[in-house]
Amino acid sequence: MRKFNINVNGKSYAVEVEETSEGISVSAPVQQAAPAAPKAAPAAPAAGNGKPVKSQMPGLVKKLCFANGATVKEGDAIIILEAMKMDTPISAPFSGVITYSTSEGSNVDSGAVLCTIA
């Protein structure tokens, strides 16, 4: 008998798996295990009238590199995102005035709108 923690829709379950001569059989969840990690907070809706810049991965917003309303150039690092213990700069895909829709210390999901650039 082997024990595993399995996450389903954000809930973690401890299960026991037994290998039999016919194959593998899985028993019903033994107990609900503690959550593996804190769940990311939903991203705030995009503020501003520009084009959205979305996160390419889930992670922690470590640094906003500009102030709201600053003018950025294409290629400027606008946000530092930590994912898998690595800092990843998010670059401006085009030039314009930036309006952030996230804050430092926030957890974001992949595809979350980080800011808009107009």
Image (cartoon, grey):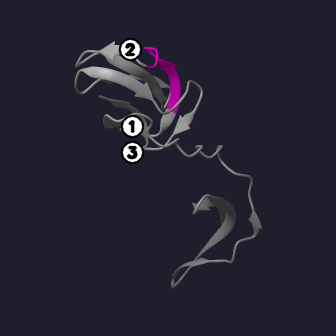
Q: Residue at x 45, y 26 (%)?
A: 81
Q: Residue at x 60, y 61 (%)?
A: 6
Please name which of the two marks, 2 or 1, marks the residue nearer to the observer.
Answer: 2
Please name which of the two marks, 2 or 3, marks the residue nearer to the observer.
Answer: 2
Query: Where does residue 61 sit, x and y in percent of width and height?
Result: 51, 27
User: Does residue 33 appear to the left or right of 61 in the view shown?
Assistant: right
Identified by mark 2, the residue type is: Ala
User: Does residue 113 appear to the left or right of 26 in the view shown?
Assistant: left
What residue sits right under mark 3 in the picture? Answer: 111
Residue 70: mark in rendering:
2
Which secondary structure, mark 1?
A: loop
Any part of residue 1 in sight: no
Quadrant in the rendering for residue 41:
top right
Asked if the residues shown at circle 1 and circle 3 are in contact, with their CB atoms under 8 angstroms apart, the answer is yes
* Vertical side of 107 occupied by 70: above or below: above
Quadrant in the rendering for residue 7:
bottom right
Identified by mark 3, the residue type is: Gly
Alpha-carbon span between mark 1 and mark 3: 5 Å
The mark that comes first in sequence, 2 or 3, is 2
Q: Residue at x 35, y 38 (%)?
A: 56
What residue sits right under mark 1 in the picture? Answer: 55
User: Does residue 5 appear to the left or right of 118 in the view shown?
Assistant: right
* Vertical side of 48 occupied by 111: above or below: below
Depth check, front residue: 114 or 1: 114
Specify the quadrant that holds the C terminus. Answer: top left
Quadrant in the rendering for residue 33:
bottom right
Residues shaded magenta: 60-68
